[in-house]
């Protein structure tokens, strides 16, 4: 080991490979940046419309001394693109240690009777169906590395506020799905959990509360730091889905 390497601070996720969805902004970006800064090889996924933001994330990770991330711009509703991830990961890295399913859409806030079927299906396609497909496709790699799957939920799944039927139902279903998956893979050394951060200054929250002062809620960086602490020291498996990050 060179003196330079010996003097370098230990990085908690050194040598780990992580997939993060919704990585172009908000909590997903903060998580991807934190992982990369701490040594992880990050595959940062976001929509095709977010290429510029992904490139800024790339610059930020490298500026922090992390390995150059792989940018994967695609729509999570494109099932065939999800299906291609395991082969790409196996070829490029030979492993997967961490999956963070963070991407989400709000859908329409309205009385249940006014929810359009297309809005319902579109919200579930991103918030639930894409995560199911990611878990199914990446399950062999997660078992191989005794890895971790973390999906980001929301308090509305438990609180069920009026007019939030689509979003709340999709997140509640996500929590139950991940809870079942966690029991299926526990014997293989895989950890799977959901976590529901409190209010965060994100674009999704701004859509839900357009009149709110954004400075009145915390930025996503604090929640990301706490989530990464949970991942790094193994406390994630003991954290209930409704816990605040």
Image: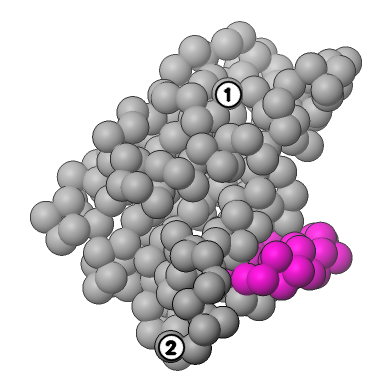
- Is 234 on the left or on the right of 17, as rendered? left
Q: Are marks 2 and 1 in contact (CB under 8 Å)?
A: no
Quarter location, residue 243: top left
In the displayed image of the protein, which residue is found farthest to the front?
Answer: 3
- Is 224 on the left or on the right of 24, as rendered? left
Q: Residue at x 38, y 30 (%)?
A: 241
Relative to the observer, which residue lies in front, 12 or 195? 12
Q: Earlier in the sequence, mark 2 or mark 1?
A: 2
Q: Secondary structure at mark 2?
A: loop
Rendered position, 138 above or below 155: below
Residue 104 percent across, percent down from the top left: 62, 43
Q: Is residue 52 magenta?
A: yes
Is any part of residue 82 visible from this angle?
no
Residue 62 percent across, percent down from the top left: 71, 72
Q: Residue at x 27, y 34 (%)?
A: 238
Q: Main secondary structure of the magenta part?
A: helix
The residue stretch that appears in magenta: 42-66
Rendered position, 106 above or below 91: above
Q: Residue at x 46, y 70 (%)?
A: 14
Residue indicated by mark 1: 198
Q: Residue at x 79, y 17 (%)?
A: 216
Q: Name the colouring of the figure.
A: one colour
Q: Secondary structure at mark 1?
A: loop
How would you rate the neighbour count of disc 1 (Cα within 10 Å): few for under 14, some for 14-19, many for 20 or more?
some
- Residue 238 bears which disc, if any? none
Q: CA distance from mark 2 to mark 1?
A: 43 Å
Relative to the observer, which residue lies in front, 208 or 98? 98
Residue indicated by mark 2: 1
Q: Is residue 217 magenta?
A: no
Rendered position, 88 above or below 14: below
């Amino acid at each position: 080991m060179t003196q330079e390497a010996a003097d370098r601070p230990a990085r908690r996720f050194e040598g780990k490979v992580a997939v993060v969805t919704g990585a172009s902004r908000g909590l997903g970006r903060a998580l991807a940046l934190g992982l990369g800064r701490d040594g992880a090889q990050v595959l940062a996924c976001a929509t095709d419309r977010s290429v510029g933001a992904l490139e800024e994330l790339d610059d930020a990770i490298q500026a922090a001394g992390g390995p150059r991330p792989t940018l994967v711009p695609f729509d999570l509703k494109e099932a065939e693109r999800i299906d291609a991830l395991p082969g790409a990961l196996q070829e490029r890295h030979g492993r997967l240690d961490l999956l963070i399913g963070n991407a989400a859409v709000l859908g329409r806030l309205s009385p249940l009777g006014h929810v359009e079927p297309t809005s319902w299906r579109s919200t579930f396609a991103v918030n639930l169906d894409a995560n199911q497909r990611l878990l199914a496709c990446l399950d062999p790699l997660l078992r191989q590395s005794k890895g971790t799957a973390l999906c980001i939920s929301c308090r509305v799944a438990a609180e069920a506020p009026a007019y939030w039927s689509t979003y709340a139902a999709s997140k509640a279903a996500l929590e139950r799905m991940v809870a079942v998956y966690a029991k299926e893979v526990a014997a293989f050394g895989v950890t799977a959990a959901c976590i529901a951060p409190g209010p965060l200054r994100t674009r999704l929250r701004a859509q839900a509360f357009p009149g709110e002062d954004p400075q009145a809620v915390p930025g996503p960086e604090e929640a990301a730091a706490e989530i990464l602490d949970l991942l790094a020291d193994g406390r994630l498996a003991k954290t209930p889905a409704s816990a605040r990050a």
